[in-house]
Amino acid sequence: MRATCPAPSSFAATRCNPPLPGARNSRAAVDVAPAMTQGHTISTHAEDVHVEVRLDGELVADARRPVMLEETGLPTAYYLPKDALTVDARPIELSTHCPFKGDASYWTIEVGGRTHDAIAWSYETPNEGAEDIEGHVAFFADRAEILVDGVAV
């Protein structure tokens, strides 16, 4: 399944979330014209912080010095090296395209018998300007508990 992110003006509302498997995708694909991308920026930097990700109270990822991605209109995303995962993550056949970061792949994690579909994403070959997130995975903050230096974000 492939979906295209909405135009930047609506990124904040959707966070470019993928449709869950089995859900009907009601978003139309949008070609982003160059004029629509003016003023939209992304930046990445490594930060000396400790990030833990929990699902249903269980630690599923633990990393120090994640790559932080800041994007116009969105909260900071914490990208952790894939080796920071403490559980198995299963890639699924879902991808989305962001004109700024590239093609995202999605991951499902099972914890305590509960399946968390498309809970995390990664950019295997990110666009120019987002190369620092290659080989890293990020989690949806509204669906996972993300702690930065012990404080929930």
Image (cartoon, rainbow, N blue to C red):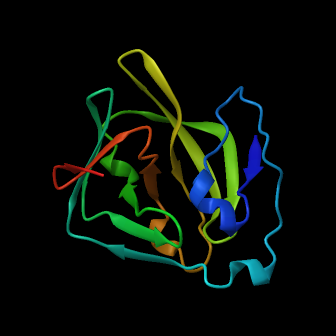
Tell me if residue 112 comes above or below residue 74 in the rendering. Answer: above
Is residue 33 found left or right of 135 in the rendered image?
A: right
Which x, y percent locates residue 142?
44, 42
Image quarter hosting the N terminus: top right
Which x, y percent locates residue 93?
68, 38
Which residue does the image show at 81% across and 77% down from the upper left? 33
Residue 124 seen in render: no
Q: Nearer the viewer, residue 26 or 148?
A: 26
Which residue does the image show at 40% across and 51% down from the upper left? 82
Is residue 1 found left or right of 152 in the rendered image?
A: right
Residue most toward the left? 150
User: Quadrant location of residue 127?
Assistant: bottom right
Q: Nearer the viewer, residue 137 or 77?
A: 77
Which residue does the image show at 31% across and 49% down from the upper left? 84
Q: Nearer the viewer, residue 82 or 97?
A: 97
Number of numbered discs visible in the structure rendering:
0
Residue 134 seen in render: yes
Is residue 146 found left or right of 28 in the rendered image?
A: left
Residue most toward the top? 113
Tell me if residue 115 comes above or below residue 148 in the rendering. Answer: above
Q: Nearer the viewer, residue 114 or 136?
A: 114
User: Quadrant location of residue 37?
Assistant: bottom right
Which x, y percent locates residue 123?
56, 59
Which x, y percent locates residue 143?
44, 38
Which residue does the image show at 46% across and 59% down from the upper left? 135
